[in-house]
Amino acid sequence: MGQDESGARPRVIERVRARQERHRQRNRLFRVGFAAAGFFVLLLGVIMLFTPGPGWAAIILGLGMLALEFTWAERALERIIDQAERAADQVSKGSPARRAALLFLGVLSTAALVAMIVLWDIPFFPG
């Protein structure tokens, strides 16, 4: 886990590890504040999984911040990145039928959203 076919680690993890040493040389108060901000961003990401917003992006950002301080966060970040890369590979290298089904579902969900906006008179832009 954590390595691709060539044995290389994901670039994000390598960048996190490169920044860890610099981060650990900072003032302890800064590090505590940075970790608190990381937990806050992670919590917002989890909340956004159930509400509108970029939940997974916030979770990855929060884990990236926490990975500078905690090894458990680095491992979790590495697992999420590995799973995201595998999912992207499955979609891009999947069978034509699977890609067509995903495209159809995307078009269908977009059409359903447009229909709800038009039929229920939902304002698209606030104000």
Image (cartoon, rainbow, N blue to C red):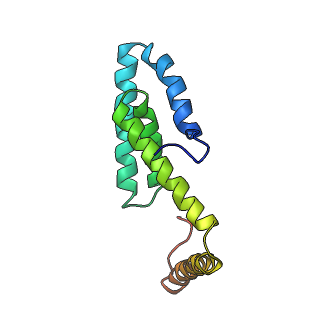
- Residue closest to the far bottom: 119
Towards the viewer: 67 or 27: 67
Residue 12 percent across, percent down from the top left: 55, 38
Residue 69 percent across, percent down from the top left: 38, 26
Towards the viewer: 71 or 23: 71
Whether residue 112 is visible to the viewer of this picture, yes or no, is yes
Tally of marks: 0
Residue 4 percent across, percent down from the top left: 57, 46
Residue 76 percent across, percent down from the top left: 39, 43
Quadrant of the rendered image containing residue 35: top left
Whether residue 41 is visible to the viewer of this picture, yes or no, is no
Quadrant of the rendered image containing residue 100: bottom right
Image: 127 above or below 65: below
Q: Residue at x 56, y 65 (%)?
A: 90
Q: Residue at x 53, y 43 (%)?
A: 3
Q: Residue at x 50, y 27 (%)?
A: 17
44 displayed left or right of 54: left
Image: 45 above or below 70: below
